[in-house]
Image (cartoon, rainbow, N blue to C red):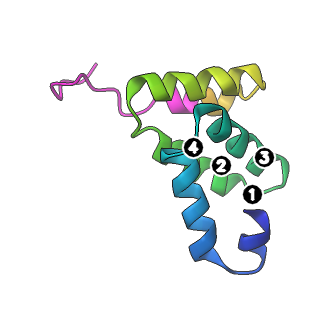
Amino acid sequence: MAEYIAAGDLARANGLIRHAASSASPAEAAMAISSCRMVGVPDAAKAIVAQAKRRDPRGVMAIAYHLIEASGYTDASELLRGDARLSNGEEV
C-alpha cells in the first residue's frame, strides 16, 4: 500500500484500504492497520479503521482482538469507539 501511495497510485491504495477494511479476515485487517503504521502511512491506517467500523459487531470485535494482540491499543480503542448503535438504530 505504501508503494502505491508513494507512486501516486491512489486508486489502487484506496482499493486495498477498502479490501482490508471490509473483506479481509479480521487478522489480515489488523495486520494491514499495523503495517501501515510501521511503514509510515498512518492516514491509511486511520482510513482502514474508519471503514472497518462498518463491519458487523463480531467482525469489529475480532479486528480489535487482533490489534490488541499486536499491541495496537490506540487503533483497537478507536475501532471500538465507533458509531456504536444497536441494530434498531438506537445509540448505545
CA distance separating discs 4 and 2: 14 Å
Q: Residues within 10 Å of mark 4 (few under 14, many from 20)?
A: some
Residue picked out by circle 3? 35
Q: Nearer the viewer, residue 58 or 53?
A: 58
- Point out which mark residue 45 bears: 2
Q: Nearer the viewer, mark 1 or mark 3?
A: 3
In which image quadrant can residue 3 be found? bottom right
- Kind of residue at disc 3: Ser
Cα distance between the residues tagged 4 and 1 = 19 Å
Calculate the distance from the C-alpha at mark 1 to the C-alpha at mark 3. 9 Å
What are the residue bounds of the magenta stretch?
77-92
Q: Secondary structure at mark 3?
A: helix
- Asked which secondary structure carries label 1, the reply is loop
Q: Earlier in the sequence, mark 4 or mark 3?
A: 4
Find residue 1 and report its image quarter: bottom right
Residue 24: image tag:
4
